[in-house]
Image: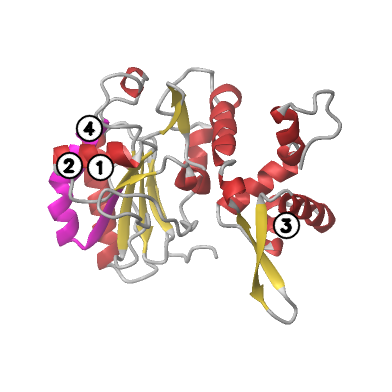
Amino acid sequence: MRATWSPDPDCAIAAAVGVIGDGWNLLILRDVARGVDRFDALAAALRISRKVLTLRLAQLVEAGVLHREPYQDGPTRYAYQLTARGRDLLPVLVALQDWGDRWLLGDGDLTASARRDGPEAHRVRALVGTPVPVLHLPATTAASTDPVDPAARRTVLFGYPATGLSTGPDSIPGAAGCTLENRLFAAAYPRFVAAGVALRGFSTQRADEQAAFAAAEGIAFPLLSDAGLDLIAALRLPTFRVSGVERVKRVVLVVDERRVVRAVRYPVTDIADAVDWALATGAKGRTRARGTSTATTGASQRHTSLALPGRAGRT
């Protein structure tokens, strides 16, 4: 689909605006990336009229950004999924979020952290009770790995900007310490295994960079490469841009066997304490009966962590 109204018909920006320039189209792509893929769910999440939603979905399908997959017969109903063309728009969504977090919801400073009481922190902590979509990301332990271990009652998933870099992210406030963070998680990994809690780390580094770091440091648990920003877009995780690359801000999630986020630590300002919190929260959730609280303990958690009371995740 090419823009026909532009004075410069060869302008790629004008052509792209013809597909995603409408605000509803961007929000539809945002929610489909989050796993909200059915018409009624999209209408409810966006609070959009069904007529407008029908028109916008048809436009995105026609543009090859979404495709429809039937999930019910009699009457036939469809789920909407991102195509390869649509997945290539994820960096656009993440860049818009990054810009909004920094310049509209923030004070314009480039930082790898966040205010504990700011809009960005509220958005991340609101992940408690929401599902993590099934994804397949390159990992240091396998060609493709789901961020959530399907065999574990709890998975601890921690995001970090980058490891093993001497320049770049380490110069940004709040970004330094990623190598130390992985070393601390690696040192505690036997205790995670003993508690039956799966552990996964992720960043936007390339898979080969992750693999080299894991080999050098002897990291036994999977490090996932979210270079395509699939997980970050799915969970609307905060990022910051440095040296032309989006880096995820440090965050820790505890996810249950139903893929529901049970607890969140964000922002992460004390790495050692966050490792202890992740192990204690994950192990506590495993030993309790299904549906009971995984509330955090300790005064240091009061503003930086949230845990899910005993309620099922949304579907």
Chain-order first, disc 3 or disc 4:
3
Which class describes the residues within 10 Å of circle 1: few (<14), some (14-19), or many (20+)?
Answer: many
Check disc 4 and report the residue beneath it.
Answer: 179
Farthest-out residue, bottom = 74
Name the residue: 73% across, 39% down: 23
CA gap between label 3 and label 1 equals 41 Å
Check disc 2 and report the residue beneath it.
Answer: 215
The nearer-to-camera label among 3 and 4 is 4
Residue 126 in view (yes/no): no
Predominant SS along the magenta part? helix
Against 290, residue 172 (above or below) is: above
CA gap between label 1 and label 4 equals 14 Å
**Left or right position of 148 against 101:** left
Q: For the residue labelled by badge 4, is the local secondary structure a helix, a strand or a loop?
A: helix
Chain-order first, disc 1 or disc 4:
4
* Residue type at numbered disc 3: Ala
